[in-house]
Image: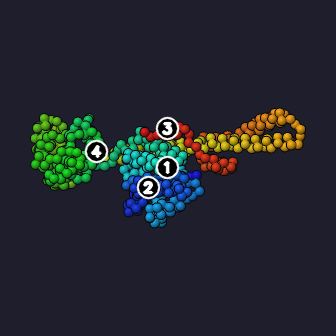
Amino acid sequence: MSVVLIGLSHQVAPLELREKLHAGPDARTAHLQALVERGVAREAVEISTCNRVELVVSLDGTSAEQVIQTVARLRDVDSLSIARHSYQHSDVDAWRHLFRVTSGLDSMVLGEPQITGQVKAAYQHGCDAGTVGPNLHRLFHKAFFAAKRVRSETDVGRHAVGIAYAAVQLARRIFDELATKSVLLIGTGEMGQLAVRHFREQGVKSVTIASRTASRAAEVAEELDAEPTTWENLDDAFLKADAVVAATDAGTPLLGRANAERLMRARRGRPIFLIDISVPRVFDNQASEVGGVYLFDVDDLEQVIEENREQRRQAAQDAEDLLESELRSFERELASARVAPLVRSLHMGFEEDVAKEVDRTVSRLRERTGVHDDQLDELRDALMAMGGALRKRWLAAPVGVLKSLGRDGRVGELDVARRVLGLEDVELEIPSNIAEQAEAE
């Protein structure tokens, strides 16, 4: 039995195709159940987000091509289109990809935390649909455990590389505590709004939105749970704000040296943080010469962004190394989980064969000799004891090999040994503590 992952993401598939493959919860449940009921897959989970549609299946005697053809029929999509724009991974490569996705290492924004919750929801959906069995149960819990380690033991996701986040990082260098500060956003564009959202994540409660159009200021302020203000009241807004983000195309200067001096006298020296990401800039560089004024522009932000890029590259490599370690651990867990039922089946098969042969021998003796039943019972016990001793001696070597393969996580060789010993039908079991051990939260 193998695990296969078939996926279409923003990296390889057009949005139109991903939209066709996207299905609502009820339809997704029906499709997962159809894959299992038709014998195409033993187990199935579908991860569906705005950036990807991925199907993780456990197969036994079927192929990825059969899965694609079935999905194409269920979703009324050309199977060739799916095959052409999809990627396919099997076993270790499938595990690795799932671990990377769940940890945010395959996202558009490296380290995004939302994807872990989305994968958990997909797994739970599969459980509710009845299409998750021992293979995917273990795999997904291990993916959640690995994602938790990435979040807690590496800096992935802590070093954003966008201009808006860099602005917030600079503000944190000026103010020890942002939660008690007030923010003024001049302009209502996407970049400015994103900066406000980042300030909110740092605990900022007081936000004011200024726009040349009062209705637009009110609209954005409502969306961001902020207070709107008019262009005419900017002087008062500057006086109250601790941090000001200018992201406007006003074109005319809003703060020069003389204005900054008057502002700081009115503020009684209380420092103000100014970030100018407008094109063209609306804060004059000379304003930064006034004491208490901390002015930064896009060039300053680029330096922060480059620092973050380097930190994120190192964090990403740390995360990749951690995931490889978890993959090796999962291989060992999987191999070890397979060993116990294999060893048990091997011993039980030997015992059953011994019992059959002993019964056959005793039966022949009863027919051909006049030996008393009590003596035959004693003989049977002696033969069974001899069979038990031979079982332990003859199985010592193969059992030792199985246990060694399990400890080393050599899943492929373990499967070969399984076939050689005639144990292909032995069901894989889950250790009783696997769910507790692998829970992410």
Residue at the image position 54 percent from the left and 58 percent from the top: 38
Circle 2: element type: helix
Residue at the image position 48 percent from the left and 60 percent from the top: 71
Real-space Cα separation, disc 1 to disc 2, in angstroms: 12 Å
Indicate left or right for 190 with 258 as reference.
Answer: right
Sequence-earlier tag: 3 or 1: 1
Residue 305 position, x and y percent, is 32, 47
Sequence-earlier tag: 2 or 3: 2
On screen, 369 above or below 5? above
Residue 130's tag is 1
Real-space Cα separation, disc 3 to disc 1, in angstroms: 20 Å
Answer few, some or many: residues within 10 Å of disc 2's Cα (few below 14, many 20 plus, some between 14 and 19): many
Residue 322 position, x and y percent, is 47, 43
On screen, 233 above or below 268? below
Indicate left or right for 147 with 254 as reference.
Answer: right
Q: Nearer the viewer, residue 259 or 220?
A: 220
Answer few, some or many: residues within 10 Å of disc 1's Cα (few below 14, many 20 plus, some between 14 and 19): some
Q: Which residue does the numbered mark 4 point to in the structure image?
A: 198
The answer to whether the residues at label 2 and label 3 have Cβ atoms under 8 Å apart is no
Real-space Cα separation, disc 4 to disc 1, in angstroms: 40 Å
Query: Label 2 amino acid?
Result: Arg
Circle 3: element type: helix
Query: Label 3 amino acid?
Result: Glu
Q: Which label lies toward us, 3 or 4? A: 3
Q: Which label lies toward us, 2 or 3? A: 2
Q: Which residue does the numbered mark 3 point to in the structure image?
A: 436
